[in-house]
Every structure is written in structure tokens, then in C-alpha cells.
Amino acid sequence: MKDAKAALRKEMKARRSALAAAHPQAGEAMASAFEARGNWPSAEVVAGFHPFGSEIDPLPLLMRFHARGYGLALPALVESAEGGQMIFCAYDPIGALVEGPYGIWQPGPDAPEVFPDIILAPLLAFDREGGRLGYGGGFYDRALDYLKAAKRGKDSPLQVWGVAFSAQEVARVPTEPHDQRLDAVLTEQGVIEIRKNP
């Protein structure tokens, strides 16, 4: 399984780099496609991420959520007993960000931790069953475990939406029991609903 994931990661990193170079406005197209649906979710806080490398840019979509009164959050890596934990902190679009581990911009240490209702998650590959291939560090899987436990019993369960170029779709993502599944995928061509197993 690990070999299959490693091989797919290598292939998809190259594919995504080519897609990002060919479609620099894909993030704006994704935001416009989502807005055109006119189906804004019932949620208070939406978490995105600051794009890194060839990731599709979710910030145009986050700004549309912000304009409609949603609270925003970004992931932040903090020290923990395990060496590093990803939490989500409040994000003010006009506030300053700091450079975190791996060179990724994140809210500063004074930003309060929040518990989002929707998380926009980066990825390397996805499938129609909700499979998500991440980068191999397990940060999102552990953070989602933590957040789902925190929201258990609440009226609105946590939703995880992958954000990707449409060409990052594959027939099947190799998954393991700890891998968190997606509820939907947002692309520059529109929203892909995930087939739910009965």
C-alpha cells in the first residue's frame, strides 16, 4: 500500500504542477463555479488553506464565503507531545500571517483556535468514492479525527471538501483505515458529489 501511494504521489505531483502552470486562474474559476450554484451551506466557520506550490488556490472562494458573513479559518502547525499537530485558527483576510513549518503561511500565535464546520482540504489525487491522497504526513487525517471527536453530537457534523484541479481525479485512490474520506470535491469545473456507500 505504501509503495502504491508513493508511486501515485510522484505521478500526481508532476501532473498537478503541469495543471497549475497551464491554468493559473483555476482558483478563481473554482470560486465562480461554486458561486454559480447558489447553494451556500448552513455553516458558521469555513476553513481553507494558504496555497503552497502547485496547489489550486482556495483563497478566491474563501473571500466569497467571507463576503457572505461566514467566519474563516486556516490550518496552523503547532508543537505537541507528538512533535507537531495541525489545528485550525481564526483567519482575518486583512490580518497578518506568519510563515509556519514547511514555509506555509498560517495565522499567528495569537489567533484563537476554532472548530470549523467545513474544511477545504488540499490533495494530490481524489476519486468518486471520497478517497483523498495527501502528502503522507498524516496532518489532515489526525486533525480531522480530532475535530470530528470535538463536534460529535453537534447538530452540524464536520464536512470535508477536497479542492483540486478536475484532472487530479483518478479511478481509485489507495486507502488505509486511518485515511479520512471527502464529502465532496470542488474543482475549476464545478462541484463533484461523492457517492456515499449504503
Image (spheres, rainbow, N blue to C red):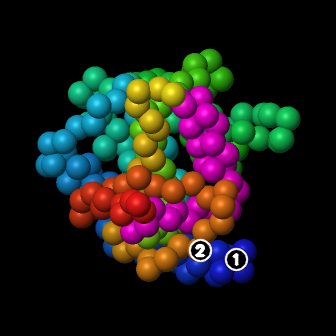
Identify the residue position indicated by label 1 in the image. Answer: 1
Quadrant housing residue 145: top right
Against 117, is 57 above or below? below
Element marked by disc 2: loop
Tell me the amino acid under the disc marked 2. Pro
Report the disc number at residue 174: 2
Q: Is residue 107 left or right of residue 191?
A: right
Circle 2 packing at 10 Å, graded few (<14), some (14-19), many (20+), is some
Residue 19: image x %, image y %? 39, 72
Quadrant housing residue 105: top right
Q: Is residue 158 visible?
A: yes
How many angstroms separate mark 2 from mark 1 (CA)?
7 Å
Which one is in front, 26 or 39? 39
Residue stretch in magenta: 128-152
Q: Within the magenta stretch, is there residue 153?
A: no
Q: In terms of sequence position, does the residue under pointer 2 or pointer 1 come before the other? A: 1
Residues at circles 2 and 1 in contact by the CB criterion of under 8 Å: yes
